[in-house]
């Protein structure tokens, strides 16, 4: 009922630009990303349509010419997931989040995430992250079993899949 993601294969631990060079049966591959998985599961479970980007628009990007600044979307995604995994309200940001680069305090970021996701706000600070990981692992398993019926290899990468590009249409 908790956890269960498919972890460990070598292709999960390399940079995404290197994964783009993977070939399957001498065919080029594509990586299909389903990046709003946990928010999507939460919205759909309530019969609601999820936002197209659950993590965008929460941190205002000013002075974006700093190449050392962390990516705002990935910071929000990490914060969102920390809020789902925590069993009680976090008084401090997760370690290494890098909020100072954006001029925002943890309390403000947490509040913005809750406001943007008001329909699912009851999920934050309830420790549901592992349950959601289990649900997305069941979805990943179904995707891989779907392709296995036709002997089509699919490589899972957390919330994305690598497949020979000729099978792109089946992944959408």
Image (cartoon, grey):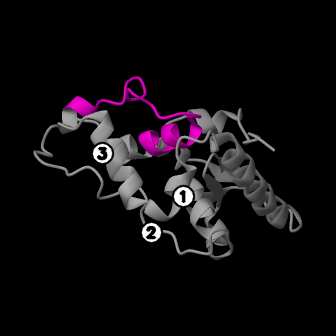
The front one of 112 and 167 is 112
Q: Please report contact status of discs 2 and 1: CB closer than 8 Å, yes or no.
A: yes
Q: Residues within 10 Å of mark 3 (few under 14, many from 20)?
A: many
Element marked by disc 2: loop
Instruction: Please state if 76 lies on the left or on the right of 99 as rendered.
Output: right
Specify the quadrant that holds the N terminus: top right
The CA distance from mark 1 to mark 3 is 17 Å
Name the residue located 40 percent from the left edge and 28 percent from the top edge.
Answer: 91
Please say whether residue 120 is visible from this viewpoint. yes
The spot of residue 129 in percent (x, y) is 62, 42
Q: Residues within 10 Å of mark 1 (few under 14, many from 20)?
A: many
**Residue that numbered label 1 is attached to:** 39
Name the residue located 79 percent from the left edge and 58 percent from the top edge.
Answer: 144
* Magenta segment: 78-100
Task: Name which quarter of the figure residue 78 lies in.
Answer: top left
Q: Disc 1 or 3, which lies upstream in sequence? A: 1
The spot of residue 20 in percent (x, y) is 52, 50
Instruction: Please state if 21 lies on the left or on the right of 113 as rendered.
Output: right
The spot of residue 94 in percent (x, y) is 43, 28
């Amino acid at each position: 009922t908790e956890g269960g993601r498919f972890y460990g294969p070598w292709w999960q631990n390399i940079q995404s630009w290197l994964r783009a060079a993977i070939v399957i049966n001498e065919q080029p591959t594509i990586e299909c990303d389903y990046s709003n998985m946990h928010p999507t599961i939460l919205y759909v479970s309530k019969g609601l349509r999820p936002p197209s980007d659950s993590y965008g628009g929460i941190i205002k990007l000013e002075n974006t010419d700093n190449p050392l600044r962390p990516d705002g979307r990935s910071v929000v995604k990490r914060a969102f997931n920390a809020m789902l995994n925590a069993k009680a309200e976090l008084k401090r940001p997760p370690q290494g989040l890098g909020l100072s680069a954006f001029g925002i305090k943890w309390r403000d970021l947490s509040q913005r995430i809750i406001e943007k996701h008001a329909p699912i706000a009851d999920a934050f600070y309830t420790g549901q992250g592992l349950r959601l990981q289990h649900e997305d692992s069941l979805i990943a398993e179904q995707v891989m079993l779907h392709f296995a019926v036709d002997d089509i290899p699919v490589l899972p990468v957390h919330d994305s899949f690598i497949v020979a590009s000729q099978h792109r249409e089946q992944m959408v």
